[in-house]
Image (cartoon, rainbow, N blue to C red):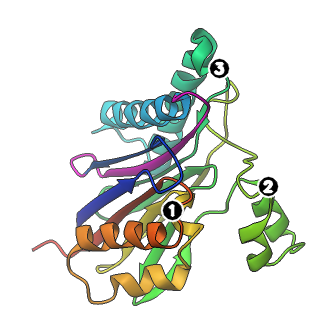
């Protein structure tokens, strides 16, 4: 299996700065999205540190017998340490943090790691399935069935996270492994997309569309067309048969 990927990000219509970061590293089989938080560009620092640290960690583990999920666990731990250390050392970055959602694949299997409310989806045969659970107050309320999906979109605390990288010395990511099929597409995105675009619309945008870059840009444009209240980032990873 070979992986084709694209990514697109935009500041949106309401924010001055883009605190999202994404990375495409097909030579490592690693793809990720990070959505930073913190005042005065601290969120931008946090998301960049997360991406850089995760890439370095996975690169260091290339060729080892370490499982894909364990590689991602170590990558998340490395990123968390880097962000937490910078937040402690730099007064202008105090309290910063970031979400992180990442896919790592060796061509046969894929592992997923996630902290925060950036999401991963799998689109297979035109159907979409959310692979991650939001680490947020609203996410917890949804899991307990105390509010509806419609109410969640307008909830005043919908952006309050219960877990993020860099906020504490250690963080526990959610980890999973799966076997992708040819034609599967992984969708990684920040909440700037999911706040405006429905899951079924994401799946529909991918049906019969060979140009992943066009799809990722189109989804970002759709979020902006509906208000663009936040930075929006989309990464698409398609699994294809090895010729």
Query: For the N terminus, which image quadrant?
Result: bottom left
Marks 1 and 2 sit apart, C-alpha to C-alpha, by 18 Å
Q: Provide the residue span drawn in magenta.
A: 26-41
Residue 156 on image: x %, y % = 80, 58
Residue 173 on image: x %, y % = 62, 46
Question: Taking 174 as reference, is 237 above or below it?
Answer: below
Question: Taking 226 as reference, is 118 above or below it?
Answer: above
Marks 3 and 1 sit apart, C-alpha to C-alpha, by 27 Å
Q: Give the quadrant of residue 97.
A: top right
- Point out the tag, 3 or 2, that comes first from the N-terminus: 3
Q: Give the quadrant of residue 188.
A: bottom left
Task: Indicate yes or no whether the magenta region holds residue 74.
Answer: no
- Please give the residue where the numbered disc 2 appears in the rendered image: 157
Label 1 crowding class (10 Å Cα cut-off): few <14, some 14-19, many 20+?
many
Label 2 crowding class (10 Å Cα cut-off): few <14, some 14-19, many 20+?
few
Residue 181 on image: x %, y % = 35, 78
Which of the labelled discs sits on residue 94, or is there none?
A: 3
Taking the image as drawn, is residue 180 in sight?
Answer: no
Which of the labelled discs sits on residue 180, or is there none?
A: none
In depth, the one of 82 and 87 nearer the eye is 87
Residue 136 on image: x %, y % = 74, 54
């Amino acid at each position: 299996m070979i992986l084709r990927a694209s990514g697109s990000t935009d500041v949106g219509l309401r924010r001055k700065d883009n605190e999202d970061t994404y990375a495409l590293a097909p030579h490592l089989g690693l793809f990720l999205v990070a959505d930073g938080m913190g005042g005065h560009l601290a969120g931008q620092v946090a998301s960049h540190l997360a991406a850089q640290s995760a890439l370095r960690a996975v690169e260091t583990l290339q060729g080892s017998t370490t499982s894909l999920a364990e590689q991602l666990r170590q990558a998340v731990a490395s990123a968390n340490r880097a962000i937490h250390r910078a937040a402690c050392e730099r007064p202008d970055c105090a309290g910063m943090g970031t979400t992180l959602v990442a896919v790592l694949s060796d061509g046969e299997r894929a592992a997923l790691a996630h902290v925060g409310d950036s999401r991963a989806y799998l689109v297979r045969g035109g159907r979409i399935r959310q692979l991650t659970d939001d680490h947020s107050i609203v996410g917890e309320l949804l899991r307990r069935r105390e509010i509806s999906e419609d109410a969640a979109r307008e909830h005043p605390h919908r952006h309050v996270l219960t877990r993020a990288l860099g906020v504490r010395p250690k963080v526990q990511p959610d980890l999973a492994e799966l076997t992708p099929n040819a034609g599967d597409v992984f969708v990684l995105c920040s909440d700037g997309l999911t706040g405006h675009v429905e899951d079924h619309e994401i799946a529909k945008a991918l049906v019969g569309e060979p140009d992943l870059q066009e799809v990722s840009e189109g989804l970002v444009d759709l979020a902006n067309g509906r208000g663009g209240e936040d930075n929006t980032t989309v990464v698409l990873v398609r699994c294809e048969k090895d010729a």
